[in-house]
Amino acid sequence: MLDEAEGTEWISRRAPQIRLPIERVGRTSATGIPYLAPEVQLFYKAKATREKDESDFDAVLPLLDMSQREWLAEALRAIAPDHSWRQRLQQVS
């Protein structure tokens, strides 16, 4: 799922203009389990959303900070400008 990298940046195969510093792509839980950053996981889920993906978005949205919301909104703009999540990302305070 991590696609490509250039230097210290992750690059999406779907849209090469979508990038993120590699250190922001992965996280590690308190117990040492690695996981994908929630905004990146939602980016992947946004391509063809299912009911489960909508539920995941609803659960994660309040936990995203402004930087994560902005990154996801811009990434969605590049692949799906009319995606319903974009407006919701901007409404959360």
Image (spheres, grey):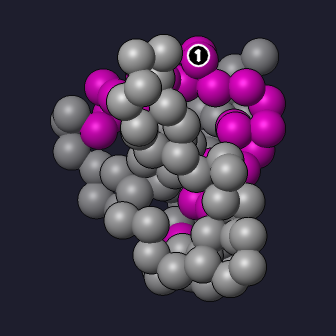
Q: Is residue 83 above or below residue 28?
A: below
Q: Residue at x 58, y 59 (%)?
A: 76
Q: Is residue 9 above or below residue 30?
A: below
Q: Residue at x 20, y 35 (%)?
A: 51
Among all residues in the image, which is located at the extreme left? 51
Dominant secondary structure of the residues highlighted in magenta in the image: helix
Is residue 33 among what the camera can see? yes
**Place of residue 31 in the rendered image (x, y in percent of width and height, measured from the top left):** 40, 17
Q: Residue at x 60, y 78 (%)?
A: 5
Among all residues in the image, which is located at the extreme front? 32
For residue 19, side relative to residue 67 (left or right): left
- What secondary structure is found at the residue carrying circle 1? helix
**Place of residue 2 in the rendered image (x, y in percent of width and height, measured from the top left):** 44, 66
Task: Tell me the magenta residue range.
Answer: 53-79
Q: Does the magenta portion include 70?
A: yes
**Place of residue 19 in the rendered image (x, y in percent of width and height, measured from the top left):** 68, 69
Q: Which residue is mark 1?
A: 62
Q: Quadrant of the N terminus?
A: bottom left
Is residue 73 among what the camera can see? no
